[in-house]
Image (spheres, rainbow, N blue to C red):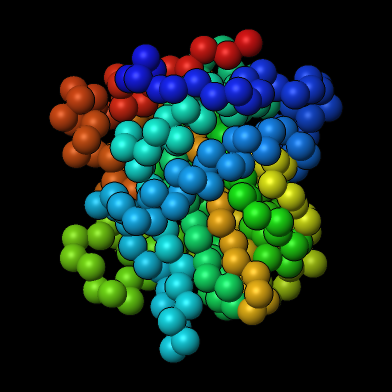
Amino acid sequence: MEQKISLLIMNHEIKRPISQNEIEQFDHDGVILLKEMFDSEWISSLSQGLDKNIELPSNRSRIWDRDENGRTMFYDAQAWQKITEYQNFIFNSPAAAIAGKLMNSSQINFYFDAVFVRSPGSQFATPWHQDEPYWSVEGYNTCTIWMPLVTVKRENALAFVPGSHRFDSTFFQFNFGSLNPDKIKDVDETNFDGITDVEFPDIAADPEKYGVVSWDMNPGDCIAFNSRIMHGGSGKLDEDTELRVFTSKWIGDDVFIKFRECGMDPDHSEVMTKQGLKPGDRPGTELYPEINFS
């Protein structure tokens, strides 16, 4: 697959070294803002890919919110195999190196991509949650690169509770499959009944209590975060403001496949099984390619 990707003139290497302080902050807080890590060419290319993705969504796509004015929140995941611009980014951008260095990992695999597009004026806010409880893998060494393709105000950006990736409790998580105003059949769903009775904290009611952080961001900036950190928000846009975000998910040394009783979203169990992968295995094959980085 890598040979089919047309290389573009963009920064393939990290534009500046990841410092030891940044590695320690990522480990301690579970999240870090990195400014000006991607050239404008990467933003332009991903924007073109996102336009294609919206026109030709994958079978995992759906609208999370559609209000009375027709404003929507579009979501899609694991579309990279048919979007050349996404493939180019995964194999040739600095993203893998950024994630690998922050995780201090000797091996890194691409897990999946996800995109989020909010119409101008959308008031939908992402429910607070953690990512790993939904995933078909488990492990501490994970890193999501969250990249806005447009300028984002702090109040519209994704927000985080620093340090919450180290909480011991298993929290009851929101069922994102319920966000389906178009009633699409067979969407991935989760149900944490019987898994845990620990309610998820009401972070939105008292963000100061939880030390919530978010940032103003420009295209080229990114947020890197651990899949166990609590995060949410990113809504209530101005009438002339849209939100377009590309994310890439990366897994490091200690991550292994786990199929969850509560369900998974996105559920990779079927495609993993077809690839000959089973619980306890290290994700690999062409679906979860190992990316060399230095």
Q: Residue at x 41, y 68 (%)?
A: 64
Q: Residue at x 30, y 52 (%)?
A: 56
Give the percent coordinates (x, y) of residue 21. Answer: 83, 27
Q: Based on the displayed image, in which of its 4 quarters is residue 22 positioned?
A: top right
Q: Quadrant of the C terminus?
A: top right
- Is residue 25 left or right of 180 when viewed as pictured? right
Give the percent coordinates (x, y) of residue 172. Answer: 45, 61
Q: Residue at x 24, y 31 (%)?
A: 272
Give the percent coordinates (x, y) of residue 281. Answer: 31, 22
Quick check: 196 above or below 22?
below
Quick check: 48 above or below 285?
below
Q: Based on the displayed image, in which of its 4 quarters is residue 40 positioned?
A: top right
Quick check: 70 above or below 25?
below
User: Would residue 136 be seen by someone viewing this image from the given angle?
Assistant: no
Q: Quadrant of the N terminus?
A: top left
Give the percent coordinates (x, y) of residue 81. Answer: 32, 34
Count of picture labels: 0
